[in-house]
Amino acid sequence: MFKKAVEAKAQQRLSGADRKKLKRTIRDRFPRPSDTDIEALLPPKAEITVSKFPNRVLVYGVEGGYPLFFDVDGRGSEIYPTVFALWKLPDLLPSFMLKGGEVSRFVIGGADLMFPGISVPAEGLTPFSTGEPWAVKVPGNPAPIAVGSTTMSSAEAIKAGLRGKALRIMHYYRDLLWESVEGHYVPNPGFLEDVVVEDPSLLTSNQPSDSSEGATRGSDVPESFIDNENTEEFIDVDHSISDTFSASTQNGSDKSANKITTDDSDLKSANVTDMKSDIDLSSLSIEYVDSHLDICLLQAFHTTIKDKDLPIPGSTLWSNHVLPCRPSGITLDIKKSSHKKLSKWLQAKSSTGLITVKEDKYKKESMLIAVNRRHPEYLQFKPEKRPVEKVVQVGDAAASESPSQNVLEVVEVYKSSVHVNPIFASVGADTGKLHLASEATDIVFKYVEKENLVKQTNKAIVVLDASLCDALFKGAIKKGSTYPTEIHKKDLGATFISRMQAHHVVTRGSESVVRKGALKTVQILTERRQGNKKVTKVSGLETFLVGAEALASELQKKFACSTTVAELPGKKGLEVLIQGGVIDDVARHLLEQYGIPKRYIEVLDKTRK
């Protein structure tokens, strides 16, 4: 299952409903643990994340902690605990006990478990059926080393003479799921440090050699103990564990035992009992979140944010630059920091002199105006060379694979107006072209440089000549008021841009369109009809290049209700009609699945009093 390196294509937090569904699934599939045990694995107040892989496998874990469960088919029918979860709750699953440590090294190499390698108790095998999840343990240690699915029932196994494949191994110690968290502290269950082997004849004093397949298997292990189809998987395993297995037989006692040791330094830390007390998987400290926020911001300044792109809204800075620069496997939440809000965090960084921030009085949003690239924090930071993580906003697994998931990009651009046309003409700029905010700022500063308008006694001040003063303030100053004679450089760009015509370039996939002026919102309305029935209407989808027919089809499947598409009465465009009061669910769907910003979604519930 985790033998090949595959990167998760998306990672997200579970909603409250999905958390409850996951816990119900775990309780139904694993009846042995109590509710208290389940709460210990998945604390109620901890954030639970799910990583989605291209092969449909879902891996669940506590945010900032270790993976605890994985779903093979992504449907909840084949969910298994990881070795990490089994170390915390060793009795979560029934387990097969191996006959000896020499067999265990093949299991942790990826080979399936065969019946001859299992130690059958005197009272016989515990009854089991086909497809049940079972763990694998070695004698003398309660910590499981692997988890898998039974290939036949106990009755079929006895009928076959306890021969053949017993367990199809899904996940084992030191596979690639394990290695995915190797950068963190990984506790040692002790199963390689103090293993009592009941059958000394299974061990060999000769260390395995890489020179041949026979040597790799171990000369004293019967072939029937190992799944021959999967032995080749073991050859590619890290031999730092398997090559250090050794055995020594002690004479003079019927209770003689052999011990297997390993030289891996990362396996000598603690026992499984230490993991419960030393590691807190339920939450991240505020200092941890604050430090990662600063690191991601500096990483973005060094890699993705250029001066020509400024100013940019705080929401764009967060979604397009800060989040993609976070380390793999880390989920950032501004609410978990000491700042609680994005605007307060930006103001805090502004107070240190690293950035310049200004609030847009129209959008009520903080704008990043400038970055001080001579600041000590910026100069001392060394950016990491790593691929930038793509931010994928997804809901459930089925929706994340639909064609509607083309990334939405909304870019605000500006066109020259009658107010600023003289400035454009003076510097030879094209008045019919659409300009980014950074390009428009360059034009006005180019004019300032051409006319030598910088104040000699204070380089941060620009002296306004007649043309520039009219461009910035004509018509905006009340009659009788005095026109300003100078302006600060940090205010010049924003003031100049506010006098231009705003446009928006909306892009989804390969389709792109330019909208003049402010973007129209998507309107979601719920009202009652005859028979006291509720109906939800969605309109304005064309603004963000959302197909009404496609959305209606998705919502019909998602909410199990009837949907229709009709023309807006007296207006251009289409509206989607959904049976039932699903106003909040539709808004969430548009936000998560289509990436429409929350500020562009307008909801009105006429059924609420």
Image: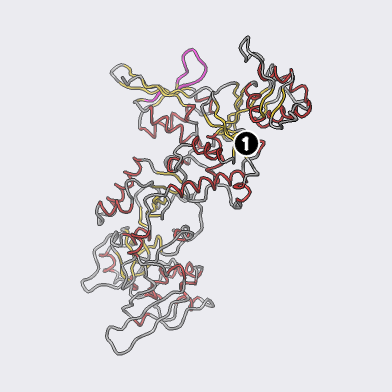
Q: Dot 1: few (<14), some (14–19), or many (≥20) neighbours within 10 Å?
A: many
Q: Nearer the viewer, residue 339 or 32?
A: 339
Q: Outermost residue toward the bottom?
A: 252
- Tell me the quarter of the picture where residue 273 sits: bottom left
Viewer-proximal residue, 374 or 313?
374
Q: Quadrant of the C terminus?
A: top left
Question: What secondary structure is marked by label 1?
Answer: strand
183, 242: nearer the viewer: 183
Q: Residue furthest top?
A: 480
Residue 161 horizontal side relative to residue 406, left or right: left
Where does the image place residue 205, in percent across and percent down from the top left?
43, 83
Q: Is residue 242 positioned above or below 251 on the image?
A: above
Above/below status of 517 relative to 317: above
Q: Position of residue 347 (x, y in %)?
A: 53, 36
Q: Where on the picture, by quarter, is residue 197? A: bottom left
Picture mark count: 1
The location of residue 269, given as percent across then percent down, is 41, 67
Residue drawn at point x = 39 percent, y = 84 percent? 248
Instruction: Tell me what residue is drawn at x 37 percent, y 80 percent.
Output: 202
What's under tag 1, amino acid-wise? Ala
Q: Which residue is mark 1?
A: 370
- From the top left corner, tell me how far across and down residue 95 is, in percent: 30, 65
Is 230 situated above or below 564? below
Q: Is residue 574 magenta?
A: yes
In front of the other: 183 or 128: 183
Look at the image and give the residue range highlighted in magenta.
566-578
The residue located at (31%, 48%) in the rendering is: 25
Please tell me whether residue 54 belongs to the stretch shown in magenta: no
